[in-house]
Image (cartoon, helix red, strand yellow):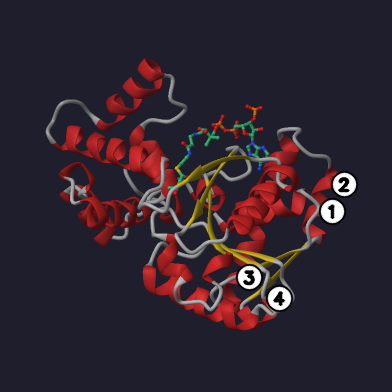
Amino acid sequence: MGAGLAEVCARAGLDVLVAVSRPARIADGRRKLVGSLDHALRKGKITEADCDAALSRVSFTADLTDFADRQFVIEAGPERESVKLDVFTTLDKVVEDPDAILGSNTSSFPIIQLGRVTNRPGKVVGTHFFNPVTVLPLVELVGSVLTEEETVATAETFVTDVLGKQVVRTKDRSGFVVNALLIPYLLSAIRVYESGVATMTDIDKAMKLGCAHPMGPFELSDLIGLDIVQAISESLYGEYREPHYSPPPLLARMVSAGLLGKKSGRGFYDYPPAAVHKAA
Ligand code: 3HC
């Protein structure tokens, strides 16, 4: 989702710095950004001049110390606690302005866990966007018990007035609002499939035609990434211990086999290489 976030910020006129995990991934990050801007251009959402201007506002780095002068940083790393804690520990040291806000796009981790590894837990806030970031208007804003109200208010103004998105504020609970409701639905679809009620494609068809969902649960799980669905499920189950949050065996088997959805070329469905580049 980092590429989508960078695109939304650049299209809003901001100077954007994107961190990737290693220098070799810079070309990949830029290709995703160019691919998505081209898509928006083809769909008539932006002009060629907008596209060029947005691209010129984005730079890439593999070195977090380059974030020293930033005012608002949004972490969008993999949904693994150790990675997020490392990033927040480092950002806290390198970002010079003590009033700079450190946001996280985490799908499910409690914000307090990220805040408490910093010396500025009052400035740490959950800024949870939705995939595809360029299209979906919602951002969940999550303050921990230590987040200052001023931080949440500034983040809200940034998200609404600068990025043009809409906000729902939530308490600092695993899954916030959307994933606490969406993930059990996706897991239930896998359980329905495992119990032999219907085929995968028919379950998707049923939810699209019967409930007007734009995607069925298997298509959506592939878009989100099966590793992410599993990680959120484990986080929800860890917090609530309710059976409907626990990952079904098929999901765990697929993740361990590297079938991660659209981004890996295969999940519940197969994806041609062109579609893989468009995965967030
Ligand atoms: N910039 C601007 N607009 C764009 C764009 C871009 N880069 N890419 C696409 N769009 C616009 C298109 O112009 C189009 O707008 P229009 O309807 O006004 O013409 C619209 O977005 C749809 O785009 P496409 O025609 O390319 O694609 P589809 O119609 O097939 O829709 C989809 C694809 C947007 C993914 C749609 O199927 C959808 O909304 N699916 C549900 C996604 C969803 O539920 N996401 C939430 C996941 S949960 C999550 O992210 C949380 C995390 O923590 C797990």
The amino acid marked with disc number 1 is Ala
In space, the residues marked 3 and 4 are separated at their CA atoms by 26 Å
> Which numbered circle lies on residue 49?
2
The amino acid marked with disc number 4 is Asp
Element marked by disc 4? loop
Identify the residue at image location x=38%, y=19%. Answer: 211
- Observer-side mark, 3 or 4, equals 4
The amino acid marked with disc number 2 is Ala
Q: Is residue 70 left or right of residue 218?
A: right
| Callout 3 touching callout 4 (CB < 8 Å) | no
Element marked by disc 1? helix
User: Vertically, is 217 above or below 253?
Assistant: above
Element marked by disc 3? helix
In space, the residues marked 2 and 1 are separated at their CA atoms by 6 Å
Identify the residue at image location x=43%, y=49%. Answer: 171
Identify the residue at image location x=34%, y=43%. Answer: 180
- Disc 1 target residue: 53
Give whichever of 2, 155 is nearer the camera. Answer: 155
Labels 3 and 4: the sequence-earlier one: 3
Give whichever of 110, 135 is nearer the camera. Answer: 110
Give whichever of 169, 232 is nearer the camera. Answer: 169
Labels 1 and 3: the sequence-earlier one: 3
Identify the residue at image location x=64%, y=53%. Answer: 155
